[in-house]
Amino acid sequence: MSANTTYIEKVTQKESNLKGLPKVLAIIIALTAITFSVFHLYTAGFGSLPSWQQRAVHVSFGLLLLFMLFPFSKKKGFKFYDLIPILLSSLVLAYALFDYPAIEYRAGQPNSMDIMIGTLLIILIIEGVRRTNGILMSILITFFLFYIFLGPYFPGLLGHQGYSYKKMIDTLFISTSGIFSSPVYTSSTVIVLFIIFGSFFLKSGAGKFFIDFAFLLVGKRRGGPALASVASSAMLGTITGNGAANVAITGAFTIPMMKRIGYSPKFAAGVESVASQGGQLMPPIMGAAIFIMAEMTGVPYIELIAYALIPALLYFLVAGIIVYLQAGKLGLKGASDEEIPKVTEVLKRLYFFLPIAFIIGLMLMGFSPIKAGLYSIFLTIGLSYLKRENWMSWRDVLACLESAAKSSMIVVSACAGAGIIVGSVVLTGLGTRFSRLAIDISGENLLLLLILVMVASIILGMGMSTVSAYVILAVLAAPALINLGVSPVAAHMFVFYYGVMSGLTPPVAITAYTAAGLAGSSPNATAFTATKIGLGGFIVPFIFVYNEALLLQGDTSTIALSVITSIIGAAAFVFFLQGYLIRETSWGERLLFLAAAITLIIPGILTDITGVALLIAGILLQIFKKKSDELVAEQVQKKLMG
């Protein structure tokens, strides 16, 4: 695109996926998106609207933009009937702006207009969710709506007395227990702000820096491009908070390099998928769900990211070791000198770490995440002027505001849809009933309950965003875990992890499919490979549930010992999984490594000593066989030469 291309021309080209979209509407979409971002920046800086109104404006304004961006049919593109939900969303927005605070005064006794607007909003949310998050979540929301009325027809613990339509509208629309509950509150204040921050951060040149920094650190090592993919995606993914988006940013560079040094297309795509999806697990930002978790658990955000650090490092450690061992198995080398960026060029751009450090520093000083995010946006814009090619013009600023608003739509609709589910659970008391039912099915066996929740989390996450899956399971499954003695933080982290991991598991694995497209590999083969590489993400939640020292619960010595044994145990698990350490492993050696991993993961001095002994035995066997192989090769060579 030429330097003379106007901002409006860029906008029009960006909207080319909406077939039949008039140019004038493309301009209106751009202005609407920018206004959406400016509204949230303004309320972050000068104070939000009253709580209910802030949330209602956020959702209705988001729906207005959503229906501009996502037509009824992707194949047919934008048609005249797509104006209908746009106009209806405008009506809801006007109602939230101009009939407040009278709406709140009618809590418990909604009038006919409240019922009409509330009904309209629910329909718009379900349709918006269908367009952005898929049909599965919209069906799930509809089911929970009907459950409010059909409770008397459900058997046993799932049954309830049933509620009137008026009561449903009062709960879902007028109160802050339904649509405008915790997910939308967090979305309207914190999440959108950090999405805006991420947009400016990437525009400032941070994406390229993180890739260069990762290649400088590990690029020349065995399997270097794959290791760099893991490292750069861990750093960048915490900013984007979206696995598929992260693949698009880093994968376009790392996947071709992995293929060039000898990794198969499906393995290269699998590595990028695991690393990119795992970015949501890596502090400090971790995507949208962590902010909602802070609101739902009452645990400050700054504490949650501290608790999440060690499990995230274990996740990426497992992925990194798998990549390294696979390179050894295939005899691969690292990147060439020409492909490694110059040290001086990378060191000059270390200032890109400042915005992240600034966010953490401000929150440690007592600033709210809202203020920390807001001030970091301005810092990021200022830092862009340190390198001429990254300078942000006013057009770039507008483009970032527009891009951020568009990126927010999936989160806004997901949070609003999840709010309907939360409201129906609160109104019907389903949370308590479901918790009791899950405990009964598991026979009060924690391990069995954890497995059931894991499966439910993965299945739910296949058809929806991490935010949606987390919120639903946080109100349904997490209480069951808590009732069996799991701490609230561990319970919520558990369901969050599997909501993230669902992006890798077939038959619906959006992140893996995105990477497969870049690698030219089979989507399902890539998803299965990614699942294998990401197995660390499947076992880590079980580890921290049974050993909460990994979530920084306990004294320093206990935490330190747990971290060390978990790292060694994770490495042993990879040796079992890969069937390779310094040579191909026999099944006997693999079972030794598996036994070592299991015993090291279980807390206790006796199990730790046993695990280390088993691991050492497996390593010594590998060394002995390696030397034996070398001796045999040497003797064969002598015979051939003799």
Image (spheres, grey):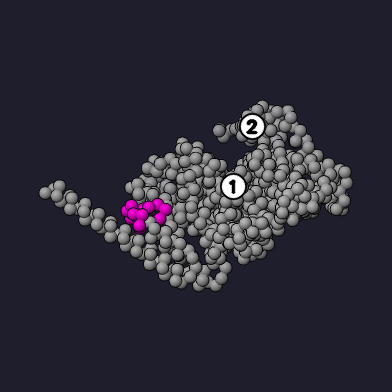
**Which residue is situated farthest in the front direction here?**
155
86, 603: nearer the viewer: 603
**Image quadrant for the N terminus?**
top right
Which of labels 1 and 2 is toward the front? Answer: 1
426, 110: nearer the viewer: 426
Neighbour tally class for label 2: few under 14, some 14-19, many 20 plus, Cα within 10 Å: few
Query: In the image, residue 249 lies at what x, y percent?
Result: 53, 43
**Does residue 550 lie above or below 197 as drawn?**
below
Disc nearer the start of the sequence (1/2): 2
Is residue 495 in view from this perspective? yes
Magenta stretch encompasses residue 119 = no
Q: Amino acid at mark 1?
A: Ile
Query: In the image, residue 539 lies at what x, y percent?
Result: 51, 57
Is residue 250 in view from this perspective? no
Residue at the location (35% across, 49% down)?
329
Q: Which portion, as a residue range, is magenta?
A: 576-589
Residue at the location (67% across, 38% down)?
131
**Does residue 600 lie above or below 642 as drawn?**
below
Asked which secondary structure carries label 1, the reply is helix
Q: Amino acid at mark 2?
A: Lys
* Location of mark 1 (residue): 459
Task: Please give the label number shown on residue 74.
Answer: 2
**Which residue is situated farthest in the left direction here?**
642
398 relative to 113 in the view: left or right = left
388 relative to 369 in the view: left or right = left
The Cα atoms of the two marked residues, 1 and 2, are separated by: 25 Å
Query: In the image, residue 333 lies at what x, y percent?
Result: 35, 48
561 relative to 19 in the view: left or right = left
Asked which secondary structure carries label 2, the reply is loop
